[in-house]
Amino acid sequence: MITTSPIGLASEGWQRELAEAWRSPAALLDRLGLSGHPIARQVTDSPGFPLRVPDYFVGLMRHGDPADPLLAQVLSLAVEAVPAAGFTADPVGDGAASRAPGLLHKYRGRALLITTGACAVHCRYCFRRHFPYQTAAARGDWADVAEQLRSLDVAELILSGGDPLTLADSRLHRLIEQVRRVSGLRRLRIHTRLPVVLPSRVTRALLAPFSRLSMRCVWVIHANHPNEVTPELGEAMARLRDSGGTVLNQAVLLKSVNDDADTLETLSEALFGVGVLPYYLHLLDPVAGAAHFDVPVARAQGLLRELRARLPGYLVPKLVQEVAGADAKRPIDVA
Ligand SMILES: *Cc1c(COP(=O)(O)O)cnc(C)c1O
Ligand code: SF4
């Protein structure tokens, strides 16, 4: 059967799962046995950045638990509309770093391409939740992007979004075909949450052209809690590694989701269990609507010290903060 998703794609299995993602807070709470709970009066439809979550990910949430750490990442709450000092629409200065539609050049040797505005899941803490995708995402064929890349002279291209893996295989493959001819480009990095929220996206058909590239491919997935690390994710990671890719994880430190040492320790262990190394643990970007996830810096430093005392060095993520105008993600000193 062929169906059409809201992002206009004829459907493979994963595309159908994406099209059928949950969009109503009331229906999601009902599914989780929480419609009679007080939390049902705290949700909102949030039209500018509505709830969106694939059923696979909902299946990892605990039934009847309003404090489930996966639910907390996706449930749209009325409190998001309450202004908080210091929390703004563009906390990381992406507007100022734009070089061409969709292409951001902030750091030496690396350019970041906003391939699409679409995501499989709407994470409530996302620093791009107010990003002007209509004007700022790359459009048209990818030849313009390749041309811009030549003039930037970078060694690494980062595919970001939105989520690049919401694009159809054909569109991604055309992009690869364009950029693999850009001389000087040695690495292709893909920042994606799809493997975590919809592991069926990681198909062999998707990966085939990646495995034939002479560039090194680095996949940076995004899991915040050990409950997101499942056998399905493990199988998707095995397919990524089979295609020759290196796989890392970035997480965001989120209040009431993963702001305790046991959870972070278990996350690193679980990720390594599926062949993924922790890369960054980000302090929350102060984006309007996300203040209820904020963890004080001193607490973050304490958690990192605890992790260092418990884990081998290669399983301790780097604690970083994005600072508008800085020449790199800023490491947070934890000594
Ligand atoms: C985060 C980011 C990168 C990548 O930074 P790394 O420290 O190399 O992971 C590159 N470009 C932009 C615009 C970014 O926001
Ligand atoms: S998947 Fe990434 S870009 Fe999309 S909403 Fe979540 S954090 Fe933001």
Image: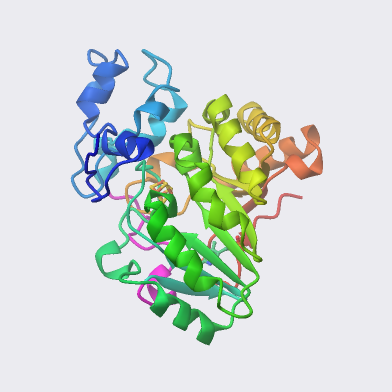
Rendering quarter of residue 215: bottom right
Q: Is residue 83 placed above or below 325 in the rendered structure?
A: above
The residue at 44%/75% (across/down) is 97
Q: Is residue 27 left or right of residue 227?
A: left
Can residue 272 be spotted in the picture? yes
Residue 121 x, y percent position in the rendering? 36, 41
Can residue 321 be spotted in the picture? no
Which quadrant of the rendered structure holds the N terminus? top left
Residue 46 x, y percent position in the rendering? 21, 42
Q: Is residue 333 left or right of residue 82?
A: right
Instruction: Please state which of residues 262 and 25 is positioned toward the viewer in this rendering.
Output: 25
Q: Residue furthest bottom?
A: 151
- Queried whether the magenta region covers residue 90, the answer comes back as yes
* Part of the protein shown in magenta: 83-101
Residue 185 x, y percent position in the rendering? 61, 74
* Secondary structure predominantly adopted by residues drawn in magenta: loop
The residue at 46%/83% (across/down) is 147
Q: Is residue 128 placed above or below 233 in the rendered structure?
A: below
Tell which quarter ligand 1 is in. Answer: bottom right
Instruction: Please state which of residues 9 and 278 is positioned toward the viewer in this rendering.
Output: 9
